[in-house]
Amino acid sequence: MTGPEVETTYREAMRDAIREALATDDRVIVLGEDVADYGGTYAVTKGLHEEFGRDRVRNTPLSESGFVGAGIGAALGGLRPIVEIMTVNFSLLALDQIVNTAATLRHMSGGQFHVPLVIRMTTGAGRQLAAQHSHSLEGWYAHVPGLKVIAPATASDARWMLPTALADPNPVILFEHNALYGEHGSIDPVGGPVDITQAAIRRSGNDVSIIAWAGMVHKAMAAAAVLADQGVDAEVIDLRSLRPLDADTLAESVARTHHAVVVDEGWLTAGLNAEIAALITERCFWTLDAPVRRLASAEVPIPYAQHLEEHAIPQVDDIVAAVNRLVRDGV
Amino acid sequence: MTGYELKGIPAEACRDLLRDMIRIRVLEERCAELYAASKIRGFLHLYIGEEAVATGVMHALDSDDSVLATYREHGHALLKGIPATGIMAEMFGRSTGCSGGRGGSMHLFDAATRFYGGNAIVGGHLPLAVGLGLADQVAGNDRVTVCFFGEGAMAEGEFHEALNLAALWNLPVLFCCENNRYAMGTSLETSESQVDLALKAAAYAIPAWSVDGMDVLEVARATKRARSMITGGGGPVFIEFQTYRFRAHSMFDPDLYRDPAEIETWKERDPVVTFAGWAIEQSLLTGDDVEALWDAARDEVTAAVIAADEAPLEPVSSLLDHVTATTEEVSS
Amino acid sequence: MSVAPEQIEYVMPSLGADMDEGSVIEWHVAVGDRVARGDVVARVETDKSDIDIEIWRDGEVEEILVAPGRLVPVGTPLLRLAASGEAVAAAVQPDDAREAVEAGSDRAPDTDPDSIVTPSSRPPAVVRSGTGLWATPLARRTAAEQGVDLTAVVGSGPNGAIRRRDLPAADGAVSSDGAPPAEEASAEARPRTRADRMRRAIADRMSQANRDIPHYFLERQIDVSALMDYLGRVNSDVEVADRVVPAAAFVRATALAAARHGELNGHWRDGAFVPSGAVNVAVAISLRGGGLVTPQIQQADTVGLIATMARLKAMTLEARSGVLRSTSMGAGSADPDGNITDAADQASTITVTNLGERGADLVHGVISPPEVALVGFGRIAQRPWVVDGQVQPRHMVTATLAADHRATDGATGSRFLATLARLLETPEEL
């Protein structure tokens, strides 16, 4: 079912998705620090506690491991919790619950239990939040079997990936880039859940495949526009799902463009970018006309000062330069 | 052999309590033997000496209650209703194991009896108990979630987060601390600033007290009381069961950190032996009755071992099964 | 019986039950050496002692695989041999040999089985790595599919690496699944290379011109002796690289003449001549690899001789290095990729073709539509010419005009050539 598109923001789209979940499924509860009166650190859940009550939009104390674990237990007990963690940096306090418990329960119980849980958290830099609120660690989660990891980059995906994630019988980690909340976009208000395992080609092109996710999708799109003026026809792939990776879409694109640039806001060393580059090399080796290139953040904790932060993370100009070098010079 | 008092426990329950302690004892002793014979691998943690805790608690529960335990959970699993065949086959790594050969000794699971493991991250399952309690509270049922953990878990942050959440939200969770005095090789005195564990738990505004964990009647009585407090809407309860493991932490542990005399002292309070003696003394059971319980337990475990040994291995083709669930699997 | 050479890897032998590894101290053979069964090929250091090792097959050493001093496990290939003759002993995996010895069998170390292993499943080497030939995987695969010898290709990538564009058939020959794209399979005559595409574009354009334009041709011999003297003076104290050549004067003169004879400067569009306000002179430049391009000098009548020369030089350089932008191309001309540019506002309005010093004497050119005139210059040569009643050797050039009879008549063309002649004969006016 489709309807006329409406203009909204990423934040509102995510809130609409959560509101719909609360309204249509009694099993859904929202758990997290300051999700009620405060409205969520990024105001995503603002007002929902008034609509649905404090039992269903439930503030938690500052105990990430505790309330993430409670979310897992509640999922085991038949609820469909949406757990909000303020940032991916804080999620490390709950890493035990996510990696040792949520991801393993189904397997180590021989398939008897499943954990239908959505954990939302922000990721990414760009707001001068320095080294304990700005990192992009989604690649760590993408490493773990038993989890699904998604990163909606558009308002439409913010609206329609959540219902699919909630319907999934597995723990789904949903990353929201903190720079995207104000991003405008048009969504189909009655669009319905979408496949969350497939990458999306945001821009078609023939000369190079730029692979990005979350906040980097928008920089890749901006770079592609600049590149078009310079005579380079770039394809931009929004991964959307970080686990599982949509290897087929990547391979199909790169086999066509013969060039690939992976743009990762995380660090280079042992990053998700490396996984993607390796995957492309394995799948597309004989169609590559240049090495796979990776752009990632500088190997430094994200600094506070604006100019330093800007230089630490990949920018549009960096993408343009890297693509030009790759396509024109083969390096 | 005195000290046991029925005080509200029906006399006819004693046979069941003794039977179950014996079943655990026999199961665990056979496990040790099978480990030496390389039939069981991985880590193996035995419950010998602590049987009164699981037995007393389990007898006070409703069959629909949820139970979470540690990696020293064979006895809990057995009394929750997982057949010895399923437990033994799991430790043999067989297809018929209660976790399909994926879990082993430390990860026994059973959805049918609401047994949520078999958890081997110390403290990690306490928040889960909170979540299960939350789900029950939302559902509005009378179920209680019972969470066993060792005293070592009380040094973990997750213990504190979990107790705080459970108290804050007034959840139906019974926290059962099996204080066997050693976290692996680290004694309580060397790891906790406050060795009065009930006092520590009480800091979260939770009713908390300490019980002799070698006295199965005392354990059952305390659990019964706690359960009724919880189902009465009083929120979570914490009980410390003071107990002792007679064997080393695991099979690969030379037990260098304990004085053999200390072990011998505790063995004088062997919960199985003393309770059997008391029951005979009180004429609740005869010597033949007790011997019959031992025989029955041996038969049960022997049958389980034979079945496990004959059970098929999981096909390697199933290696990637049960990593993520499909909607169809879950709804079927 | 003749036996075809067989590639053999000679491995580190097991010389005793307790030998697990060894290192070559010294090679006694080099690549290209002939060896015979029983020859000592190297001295090997083991835990116990240094031992000469002998080879078990005749043949020629193709490659030494392990450098002296490197400790390697038993069974590691040490050298590659193009073996001739028959294998004397059955090939046995070294591990088998070791097991036999270690198991305490009565085989003494000196009866060790032949430790030469015949690789049975080695795929045929297509391009050996480490040969110094750099090529991308796509280039390698494309070359293999099209039978192109990569060693004959000059690469444009880093370190001279060959990329797909460096191959003669650099046009989407490889699709994602390795099969040619369907559209290409059906377009049987589709040009496959850049040169092919350009040829095709020129062919289409010139065919159209010849079909649609009723050409008329005029020619005039012009005495350029004064011009040559003038250029000699201009160039006298100038670096070689900055010298002005006659072609620049031809372009300049054409531009000025076209400005004065507007009937020839413009475009034939929709059945009528449209004069152009600007004089944009396209210059035909032939490419070394065949084909030609026609970059233009915009508003050439306002560009002086020296500047015209500079533009000509730059254009030639660009054209021949293939970096010309389509916007700098003449009207209706093909860019290096065979694309036709025809932007009305920037289109060239007249074309000059200059055959140069080693060219023909004159050229009857084909007009490049939608232009209506093309001016050609043959080679400059000394010829007898009557000046002031006397036959003198003069530098002469034959200028030709190909013009569109729909737009002008011969009289107009004649006047244009007369102006052109006068300009070239009085070079100071340039």
Image (cartoon, rainbow, N blue to C red):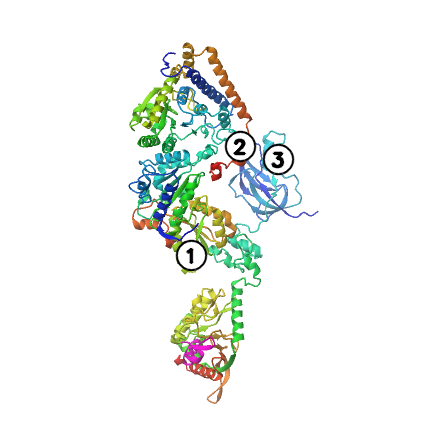
Residue lying at the far right in this picture: please name it. C1
Say which of A218 and A171 sits in front.
Answer: A171
Picture coordinates of residue C144, whole percent (x, y): 57, 54
Q: Is residue B303 above or below residue A297?
A: above
Quadrant (top left, top right, bottom left, bottom right) of the C terminus of chain A: bottom left
Residues at marks 3 and 2, CA–CA distance in whole angstroms: 44 Å
Q: Which residue does the numbered mark 1 point to in the structure image? A: A324
* Nearest-to-viewer mark from 1 and 2: 2
Chain letter for the residue marked with disc 1 in the picture: A
- Badge number at residue C112: 3
Disc 3 marks a residue whose amino acid type is Asp
Which amino acid, by three-letter code, is at mark 1? Asn
Task: Specify whether A53 is left or right of C366.
Answer: left
Tell me the element at label 2: loop
Residue C427 seen in the current view: yes
Q: Is residue B126 left or right of residue C36?
A: left
Crowdedness near tag 2: few (<14), some (14–19) or many (≥20) residues, C-alpha within 10 Å: some
The number of numbered discs placed on residues in the rendered structure image is 3
Residue with the mark numbered 2: B314
Percent x, y for residue B128?
38, 32
